[in-house]
Image (cartoon, helix red, strand yellow):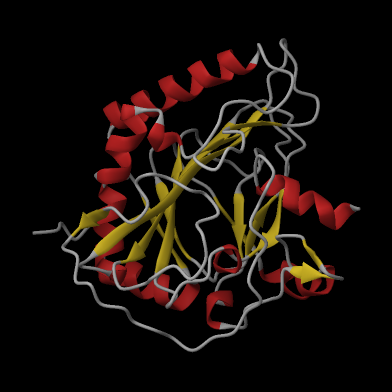
Amino acid sequence: MTNKVLTSKQVSAYWDDGYAFLNDALTEEQLEGLNRDFNNWVDDSRQHSEPFGEILDGRARFDLEVGHSTYRPGLRRVTSPVEISDNYLAVMRDNRALDGVTQLIGPDVEFNNSKINAKHPGSATEVKYHQDFMFQPHSNEDLIAVLFFLDDVTLENGPLTVVPGSHRGPLFDHWHDGIYTGAVSSDVKAAHLDHAIPIYGPAGSACLMHTRLLHGSASNNSDKPRTLFICEYRAEDSKPLQVNHIPSRYDGEVVRGTRTNRVRCSAYEMTFPEVPTGASFFVQQAKSDE
């Protein structure tokens, strides 16, 4: 039987605001293992001057920010770490936040994809405002991104910022002038920015975020890192309508409940997203600056 880790108030907050915050989503042992593997990848990145490694579709697994060097490594993205780390795979398959996911969209839940987004001290990397669902059309919108905090997240080190309630509003176009930018327009951002709030907390906690929630994050202006392991899950009856933008051999693995072989559909419209060809979605979002 699944543990009920979310209170009724947290469940209501998720549906009203589009997110729920969970303390102690990771055990100390899980957190230590995830950080150990990530730090090893950072050390390995010192030997490289451009994105490296390879995921299932041939794209680079490890993405480097502008200014990366041997002495100041800027590893900003690890794509699908569950394929190269027993620690990340084990956490993906079993964690307290996943119990919360089943309370919200369960009891039958599949793995969708995973990644690490990192902002090193002084990093200029920012995440422009977007909605995750616009990267990954499914038959319904019961998808949840679990953002595990691998470091203490503060107001200064580039925390996630969300627009509460925006998941109940429209799906905003991420195509502009024929280019898929992976971000909303400047007008949409301006209309919502005053309502955005930061999500911060101690290492080991997690934010459970609705796939339609409008969110972004600023650069890291502190001397402390901000690293997130982002693990996305979907209701078992939510079927992908396009190739997974973060492919994994574990895509579709049932991590809670059973496989029902059913599909459930909701009514919405969107233009299919661009299938990425770069090392990460940061490449797509950079197009909005061109």
Question: Which residue reaches farthest left?
Answer: 1
Q: In the rendered image, is residue 26 in sight? A: no
Q: How many labels does the image show?
A: 0
Q: Which of 57 and 114 is in front in this view?
A: 57
Q: Is residue 70 above or below residue 141?
A: above
**Residue 30 percent location from the top left of the image:** 30, 31
Q: Is 42 on the left-hand or right-hand side of 220?
A: left
Q: Residue at x 67, y 25 (%)?
A: 223
Q: Quadrant of the N terminus?
A: bottom left
Q: Residue at x 43, y 77 (%)?
A: 139
Q: Is residue 107 above or below residue 200?
A: below
**Residue 236 percent location from the top left of the image:** 29, 67
Q: Residue at x 27, y 26 (%)?
A: 29
Q: Is residue 229 above or below residue 7?
A: above
Q: Is 32 on the left-hand or right-hand side of 107?
A: right
- Give residue 268's quadrant in the image: bottom right
Q: Is 36 on the left-hand or right-hand side of 90?
A: right
**Residue 56 percent location from the top left of the image:** 49, 40
Q: Which of 13 and 176 is in front in this view?
A: 176
**Residue 70 percent location from the top left of the image:** 71, 11
Question: Which residue reaches farthest bottom?
Answer: 267
Q: Nearer the viewer, residue 246 or 214?
A: 246
- Give residue 101's quadrant in the image: bottom left
Question: Which residue reaches farthest right?
Answer: 290
- Give residue 266's quadrant in the image: bottom left
Q: Is residue 70 above or below residue 93?
A: above
Q: In the rendered image, is residue 104 in sight? A: yes
